[in-house]
Image: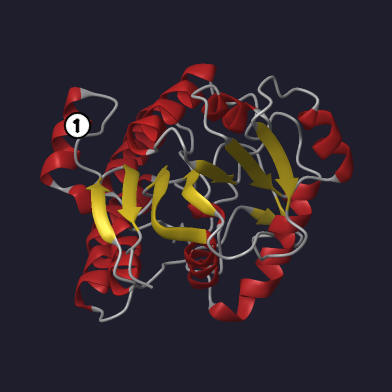
């Protein structure tokens, strides 16, 4: 039944397939599929939280567009971090218009900065592509300064709303939606969304629910947005992780939504929101 749960025994091989894909990804991946308005809104939301004196690290920036847009607000330093090949790093860096923005490439899975380096860390549609979520968030915590803010925007693939969209798409458009190919998978997904939430609700620790991305012959078989998603991003799991690290919860999905319906739904059922907008503040006491 799609999406299929990813066992821990396959984490490493899928992680390597993702890294290989991101190093040779086509230009349209993460670059042409979103309008500039999306990046403008994202930068605007960051500016509501960040101080003008903040240093900002955007993780998984994809290209120059996100850090360059954030840098327009005049922060002293904005860094975009991703798996850039040397060629792409040079090519994208030339596109940057603002002198306070720059790009940095991962050399391994660790964030290549010293502890307590940034006042704000942000990510747009990144966390759903992370397999080793605990390790990733621990690295984020290490690099973020005490009192700093973490801003996460990502889809919630454990929400019932994508399953409803999948049901409509498979029934009436005769097409797949994300990893939903058949109406029965969408119907099953509605019940699974409740189960995924309950998994985290009753667990003493955050449970990051992992799935197989769309693959063929051991490689990422990317055709559409989030075919490479591996993490369902159930927001309660992320909330629990940072609460255990004594972070203050500033925003938990309420107050956001692209339509009146999703705005109201997210306000009433934030743990089932179709899109996560999460803001945490790190404790001043370390």
Could you tell me which quadrant the N terminus lies in? bottom left
Is 71 located above or below residue 170 in the figure?
Answer: above
Q: Which residue is mark 1?
A: 263
Q: Position of residue 161 (x, y in %)?
A: 28, 42
Question: Residue at left 61%, top 73%?
Answer: 11
Secondary structure beneath label 1 = helix
Q: Position of residue 276 (x, y in %)?
A: 34, 45
Between 15 and 42, the one lying in front of the other is 42
Q: Is residue 81 left or right of residue 84?
A: left
Q: How is the image coloured?
A: secondary structure
> For the point 54% across and 22% down, which residue is it?
72
Residue 19, image x, y percentages: 73, 57
Q: Is residue 275 above or below residue 259?
A: below
Residue at the spot 33% in from the left edge and 40% down from the top edge: 167
Residue 255, x across and y down, in percent: 20, 35
Seen from the viewer's position, the closer of residues 26 and 280 is: 280
Disc 1 packing (10 Å; few <14; some 14–19; many ≥20): some
Residue 213, picture quadrant: bottom right
**Image quarter (top left, top right, bottom left or bottom right) of the C terminus:** bottom left
Picture quadrant of residue 274: top left
Q: Nearer the viewer, residue 285 or 49?
A: 285
Q: In the rendered image, is residue 231 in sight?
A: no
Outermost residue, right side: 87
Residue that lies at the very extreme toward the left in this rendered image: 268
148, 83: nearer the viewer: 148
């Amino acid at each position: 039944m799609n999406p299929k749960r990813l066992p821990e025994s396959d984490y490493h091989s899928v992680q390597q397939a993702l890294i290989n894909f991101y190093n040779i990804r086509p230009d349209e991946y993460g670059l042409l599929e979103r309008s500039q308005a999306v990046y403008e809104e994202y930068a605007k939301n960051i500016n509501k939280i960040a101080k003008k004196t903040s240093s900002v690290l955007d993780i998984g920036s994809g290209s120059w567009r996100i850090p360059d847009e954030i840098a327009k607000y005049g922060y002293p330093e904005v860094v975009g971090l991703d798996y850039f090949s040397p060629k792409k790093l040079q090519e994208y860096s030339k596109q940057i218009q603002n002198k306070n923005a720059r790009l940095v490439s991962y050399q391994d899975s660790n964030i290549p900065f010293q502890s307590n380096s940034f006042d704000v860390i942000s990510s747009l549609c990144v966390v759903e592509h992370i397999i080793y979520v605990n390790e990733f968030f621990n690295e984020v915590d290490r690099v973020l300064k005490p009192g700093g803010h973490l801003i996460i925007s990502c889809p919630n693939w454990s929400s019932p709303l994508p399953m409803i969209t999948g049901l409509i798409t498979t029934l009436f458009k005769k097409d797949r939606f994300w990893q939903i190919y058949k109406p029965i998978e969408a119907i099953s997904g509605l019940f699974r969304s409740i189960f995924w939430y309950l998994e985290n609700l009753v667990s003493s620790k955050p449970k990051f629910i992992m799935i197989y991305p769309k693959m063929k012959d051991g490689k990422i078989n990317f055709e559409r947005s989030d075919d490479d998603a591996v993490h369902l991003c159930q927001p309660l799991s992320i909330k629990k992780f940072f609460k255990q690290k004594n972070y203050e919860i500033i925003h938990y999905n309420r107050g956001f939504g692209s339509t009146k319906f999703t705005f109201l739904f997210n306000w009433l059922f934030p743990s089932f929101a179709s899109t996560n907008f999460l803001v945490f503040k790190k404790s001043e006491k370390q």
